[in-house]
Image (cartoon, rainbow, N blue to C red):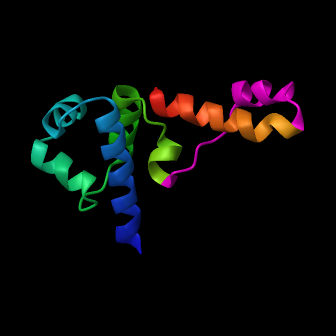
Amino acid sequence: MEKDVYVKIGERLRKQRRIMGLTQEQAAELLGVSTTYYGEIERGNRKLTIPRILTVYEKMNLEPTYLLTGEILTDKVYDEIFDGCPREKEQALEEVLRSISRLY
């Protein structure tokens, strides 16, 4: 079970790296680790320390909550967007925001 958590973290990190158009070597350099160590993180064989999680956030723009849990937290801006949205249009708006997020 614990191994599954690290595999999922590695998958989310790999996804972000690919979105950024980086190789494993480039991502490793960005995070200040060896290519071998970075590859082990992506495969779920190595753990990220808290300082390294913060580096991932700073250098790869990957929210720690999403990296660790896969959950995207709503924030004030997100809530404000939905504030004026009719209830029957909320699902459509959420889909649009998800699509924009994937493009980003």
Going by the picture, which residue comes out furthest to the bottom?
Answer: 1
Name the one closer to the observer, 84 or 69.
Answer: 84
Of residues 102 and 13, which is closer to you in this image? 102
Q: Find residue 32 and report its image quarter.
A: top left
Measured as percent of width and height from the top left, residue 102 is found at 48, 34
Query: Residue 41 location, x and y as percent?
Result: 25, 53
Observer-nearest of 13 and 94: 94
Q: Residue at x 39, y 58 (%)?
A: 8
Q: Is residue 81 a member of the stretch shown in magenta?
A: yes
Residue stretch in magenta: 69-87
Judge from the rendering whether residue 1 lies leftward or rightward of residue 42; answer left or right: right
Residue 75 pos. (x, y %): 69, 32
Along the viewing direction, whichever of 16 and 54 lies nearer the viewer: 16
Please state the horizontal and vertical placement of residue 95, each as a whole percent of the image: 65, 38
Asked whether, in this view, residue 99 is left or right of residue 92, the answer is left
| Left-right relation of 24 to 82 | left
User: In which quadrant of the rendered image does the N terminus lie?
Assistant: bottom left
Q: Quadrant of residue 33?
A: top left
- Residue shown at the point (71%, 29%) measured from the top left: 78
Q: Residue at x 19, y 46 (%)?
A: 38
Q: Is residue 51 magenta?
A: no
Q: Name the residue: 13% across, 36% down.
A: 25
